[in-house]
Image (cartoon, grey):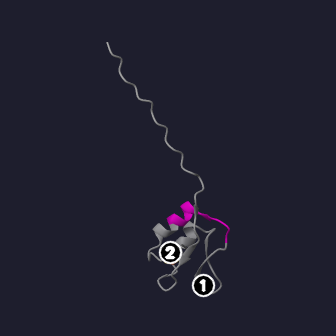
Amino acid sequence: MPRPLIMPMSRPVPRPVHRLAPRPLIDLSDCVRCEVCVDVSPSVFYVNEAGTISVAERDEYPGEEVAEAIRSCPKDCIYLEE
Ligand code: SF4
């Protein structure tokens, strides 16, 4: 009697914990200064002295946080530098 073919289960490929993102940019002409991006990613976005939103100068940008800020921005005015 033939034995049933048992296929080995494939292992899930682990996602990197800290994916990095390119530098985010903000189109200030559309920004309504709601500060959602600051709440979502305070290590990247901050309110500057002029009261507008700035992007911190960093060597690396946390991908998940930046992606969440892009998704959460109500004006879709956060972009990634190419
Ligand atoms: S979430 Fe978007 S609209 Fe709100 S402050 Fe940040 S860049 Fe501006």
Residue 53 in percent (x, y) is at 58, 80
17 within the magenta span: no
Residue count near mark 2 (Cα–Cα under 10 Å), binned few <14, some 14–19, many ≥20: many
Front-lying residue, 23 or 31: 23
Q: Which mark is residue 78?
A: 2
Q: Residue at x 57, y 51 (%)?
A: 16
Count of picture labels: 2
The three-letter amino acid code for the residue at tag 1 is Gly
Front-lying residue, 52 or 29: 29
Query: In terms of secondary structure, where does tag 2 sit?
Result: strand
- Describe residue 5's horizontal placement relative to residue 81 as left or right: left
Judge: label 2 CB < 8 Å from ligand 1. yes
Residue 29 in percent (x, y) is at 49, 86
Range drawn in magenta: 58-68
Q: Residue at x 68, y 67 (%)?
A: 59
User: Is 19 situated above or below 45?
Assistant: above
Whichever of callouts 1 and 2 sits on the residue coming sooner in the sequence is 1
Front-lying residue, 68 or 57: 57
59 within the magenta span: yes
Q: Residue at x 51, y 44 (%)?
A: 13
Residue count near mark 1 (Cα–Cα under 10 Å), binned few <14, some 14–19, many ≥20: few
Residue designated by label 1: 51
The C terminus lies in quadrant: bottom right
The N terminus lies in quadrant: top left
Residue 55 in percent (x, y) is at 61, 75
Q: Residue at x 40, y 25 (%)?
A: 6
Q: CA distance from mark 1 to mark 2?
A: 17 Å
The three-letter amino acid code for the residue at tag 2 is Ile
